[in-house]
Amino acid sequence: MHLSIIDWLIMLVYFVFVLGIGFALKRYMRTSTDFFLAGRSIPAWVCGLAFISANLGAQEVIGMGASGAKYGIITSHFYWIGAIPAMLFVGLFMMPFYYGSKARSVPEYLRLRYDEKTRAVNAFSFAIMTVFSSGISMYAMALLIQTLGLLHGIVPDAWVFHVSILLSAVIVLGYIFLGGLTSAIYNEVLQFFLIVAGFLPLVWIGLRNVGGWHGIQQKLPTSMTHSWKGMTHASTNSLGVEVVGLVMGLGFVLSFGYWCTDFLVIQRAMAAESQDSARRVPILAAVPKMFFPFLVILPGLIAVSVTSHSTAVQAPAALTQQATTSQHAVPLDEEHPHGIIPLKIDPISGKPIVDASGNPVYNYDLAIPVMLLHFFPTGILGLGLTALLASFMSGMAGNVTAFNTVWTYDIYQSYIKKDASDEHYLWMGRIATIGGILLTIAAAYAVTNFNNIMDALQLIFSLVNAPLFATFLLGMFWKRTTGHGAFTGLLTGTAAALVHHGLTIPADAVPGIHGGWIHTVHTYPSDMAQNFWTAIFAFGVNLLVTIAVSLFTKPRPEPELVGLVYSLTPRAPEHHLAWYQKPMTLALGVLAVLIALNLVFA
């Protein structure tokens, strides 16, 4: 792979622009509200793009591409079952509580609804989660730089991975340290358009090369080209999970647990200029989100549908001379069972990694990068690489801004220094940004144990977000829930998730970070199946324990819960909104399209 001067210039211009936004916004960061919440003055459409772009980090672009290559089109459930319904729910029911209560973070809402100890548990667990999520993005960016040899000849090969980690850390630290959340939001909007511009040509070229969707269906097993077929039993689909585990684990617990409680995305909606705008943010974001499987999952399917010895397209113009029939695609064979997906190499030792059975492990995380190298010519390759780099930094920046807010407001101000000036908390926010980046570097090295970063990410969500969702669900819709019940349930739910993970393990995995570190009593077909059931156990235990303890403890007086519980909160008037601006109308339209997509790819 040879990058031309045009490719380098595209990437250089992007990095300069990103840091330039931070410098331009630095003079507007006068208060902690400006730094952490963007002054609550961002238009709804900007917040909507930032809402999905904050989630469109390496976890989404690389992780979903990897899952597409590993599991097939069934990965679309992470969008059509595991995202859209929850995003609509957030806009319709939960944003009024977050925005109306004037809480500066999700843990602060828990303090208002329950008590200080419940907030503390969530604040610390969320801070840990954001560090690991940011580390996943940093690892992916370093892996890309190492794989593509972007630093070849500049630093010794043995140092490339480590230098890549530091390089990505410095860039993200620069624009967050200077411009805070506002800088992150406007960079996320830029990154959204870059990702779309970089990946649309990749999907188009790839589909033409393998003979379109029909060509993919001919080359891959049926279980990888249908989203619902084979879901009656875990052994008849590539994901290794039955319909109950999918709908309850992903569609309900993990999905709602992430979109309803993760401050990373909620923070973007809370920056909107009004409550009406804040409610529309996740609903508007759901529209492009529905079509993202075609942008990030399809490249993974294409990568396992084309063999390493097939002819790469040298220029988009040359592609127009080919017919869209499968005869132009080289069929898969026993020598290339995973298409152009390479083996996973340990970034430290440089040796291939094998599973518990001694079989080589394929590095599905490289599905998107190898697609770029396989199909993109000079110039467009630079745009594609810039789109990838943008996704990594978007994921890192989103998690770091969430971390510095929760650390400053919910940990530092609450338990370390309560009565400092606003200038002091602004200073602490910038220090927390540096600390968050340093912790992210450590987390990036821990992620090297997974061959699919989406598996690692869903494990984190099952341990943190899944039990937390039960706490939110009961708190918002059952006024009898008490602080003691929420605190006890949150602890036991998280403990249940850890115990389940420690007693189970995916097939061919070695006991440790993948599970089985207590004792193996059950083996799941895949990491993802294990994650879904870990989430179900965490949610179920938290729900039951919270209800039981709440029934035996004294609830708060109802007047104190106005604005925090659904049945005690006055509905916001919508008569001043046009019919197409009303959240319910928008949500019903999105839901209709969602049902159609599920039927088409069933």
Image: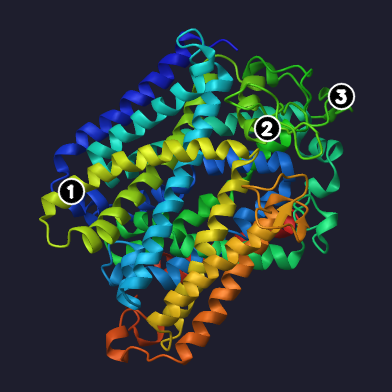
Among numbered discs 1 and 2, the one appearing first in the sequence: 2
The answer to whether marks 2 and 3 mark residues whose Cβ atoms lie closer than 8 Å is: no
Q: Point out which mark residue 363 bears.
A: 2
Q: Point out which mark residue 426 bears.
A: 1
> What type is the residue that disc 1 sits on?
Leu
Q: Is residue 597 above or below residue 3?
A: below
Q: CA distance from mark 1 to mark 2?
A: 41 Å
Q: CA distance from mark 2 to mark 3?
A: 17 Å
Label 1 element class = helix
Q: Residue furthest right?
A: 334
Label 3 element class = loop
Among numbered discs 3 and 1, the one appearing first in the sequence: 3
Q: Residues within 10 Å of mark 2 (few under 14, many from 20)?
A: some
Nearer to me, 453 or 43:
453
Question: Could you tell me which residue is drawn at 32 percent across and 27 percent down?
Answer: 17
Q: Residue furthest front?
A: 518
Among numbered discs 2 and 3, the one appearing first in the sequence: 3
Residue 174 seen in the current view? yes
> What type is the residue that disc 2 sits on?
Asn
Q: How many numbered discs sit on the rendered protein?
A: 3
Residue 470 percent location from the top left of the image: 51, 73
Residue 514 percent location from the top left of the image: 65, 48
Q: Is residue 512 above or below residue 552?
A: above
The answer to whether marks 3 and 1 mark residues whose Cβ atoms lie closer than 8 Å is: no
Q: CA distance from mark 3 to mark 1?
A: 58 Å
Label 2 element class = loop
Q: Residues within 10 Å of mark 1 (few under 14, many from 20)?
A: many
Q: Quadrant of the N terminus?
A: top right
